[in-house]
Amino acid sequence: MPYYIGDVAKSRVIDKYVVRPPEVFKKDHDIDIHTNHEVLHIDRNKKEILIRDLDKDEELTKPYDKLIITTGSRSRKLGVENEDAPNVFSLKSLLDGKRIKDYINDKGPKRVVTIGAGFISLEMAEAFGELGIENTIVHRRDLPMRQLGKDIAEMVLDELSEKGTKFVTDAKISSLDVSNGNVRSVVTDKGRFDADMVLVSVGFLPNVSLAVDAGLKIGETGAIWVDERQRTSDENIYAAGDCVEVKHLITGKGVNIALGDLANKQGWVAGENAAGGDIVYPGVLGSAHFKLFDLEVGFTGLTLSAAQKEGIDAVCETIEGRSRPGLYPGSAPIRVHLVAERKSRRLIGAQIAGRDGAGHRINILAAALFGNLSIDDIVDLDLAYAPPFTPTIDPILVAARSLLKKMG
């Protein structure tokens, strides 16, 4: 959606962003999709669901043999007065994106205040910048993106500053001040920031009310507990996506990570098993990457601080490299940050930032994490080399060698 709002994506017709409309499911797979129907209750004893047809305002019941819950997540609220003003937005759905785009086109805002500094906030920072809208990001922490260590997060701050986005750190929201029905300033303990519109992006909450009402087990994260087959505490009910808690492959603990690719894979496992199959979803690393203006950032696994909070004796290393040989056109700086468990020497986290394809390199390290490789293993990886794509020794290998020396 940030790329639709920022006029980067080709189509400006919102319906084009629906990957598979209901008629495609029916035509290709003989699956009936009932839109504008709300599930009100799951009767586990009768194996029935109570549904409201929102178009007809009628209730009906449907039996099931197996049920899959994919209720997703919702944007987290600030919990302050005036958050529902017409110029205050969150971005979770296609309709949210359309509302923001329509408001920008109709009202022509000059100043926006973004509250929060996660994925959506940073991707929208680029969109606002491309549209010429002055943007101030107000964040409760000293650095953006809790998934990043200081060395990489500082590159994000530098890119924001270079592109004209103001970043206010360690700020607590006091109020949203209104004039003529719209929020005109965001008041914090770090000052007052004028705004023509406000974007609230402070995370997501799993939609679990249906599962709670049905008496299903809820995990420690507040999301629906599932086993490795995406099965809930009821053997006839599965769940997948933003609403579930799955195993983190490094810590072994339950985590709730709202990412589309993870939801897709979990849905595949839930569907296969509900239909009589027997496949397993191994867990997650939290791998992701994003683009911020000209900067590409990728991360996977744990940061050093996250590892230490888990009681892991960890060591890290950061190096500066280049995307291609220095004399080759297009060569750009890349920063690689690796985190390893000291005793086992295995890689437990990685981050990369830079230009010229830096973001894609994180997938090498995500694969290394998934394969439980040690730093010794990574040093010996036989990575491809050609001047148009990479220097003789890839920055990932340089970082691994440097960390190996530090570990002794």
Image (cartoon, rainbow, N blue to C red):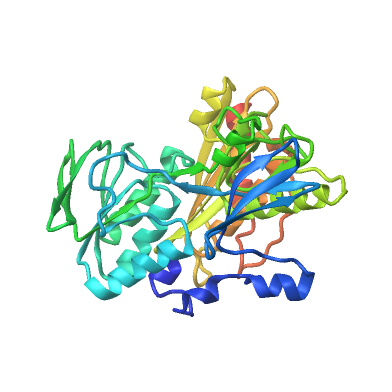
Q: How many marks?
A: 0
Residue 205 or residue 71, whichever sits in front? 71
> Given the current orientation, which residue lies at the most extreme left position?
179
For residue 266, say whether it is visible: yes
**x, y percentage for residue 141?**
33, 36
Apparent side of residue 61 relative to residue 6 in the rendered image (left or right):
right
For residue 131, say whether it is visible: no
Q: Which residue is depicted at the point 47% across and 42% down?
A: 148
Corner quadrant of residue 140: top left
Residue 143 or residue 340, whichever sits in front? 143
Apparent side of residue 61 relative to residue 351 in the rendered image (left or right):
right
Q: Which residue is depicted at the point 22% across and 71% down?
A: 107
Give the vertical position of 271 relative to 256 (above or below).
below
Give the vertical position of 282 relative to 352 (above or below).
above
**x, y percentage for residue 116?**
35, 46
> Is the C terminus in the top left, top right, bottom left or bottom right quadrant?
top right
Residue 282 or residue 335, whichever sits in front? 282
Q: Which residue is depicted at the point 70% across and 40% down?
A: 283
Apparent side of residue 326 relative to residue 385 in the rendered image (left or right):
left
**x, y percentage for residue 351?**
53, 45
Give the vertical position of 107 relative to 404 (above or below).
below
**x, y percentage for residue 319?**
51, 44
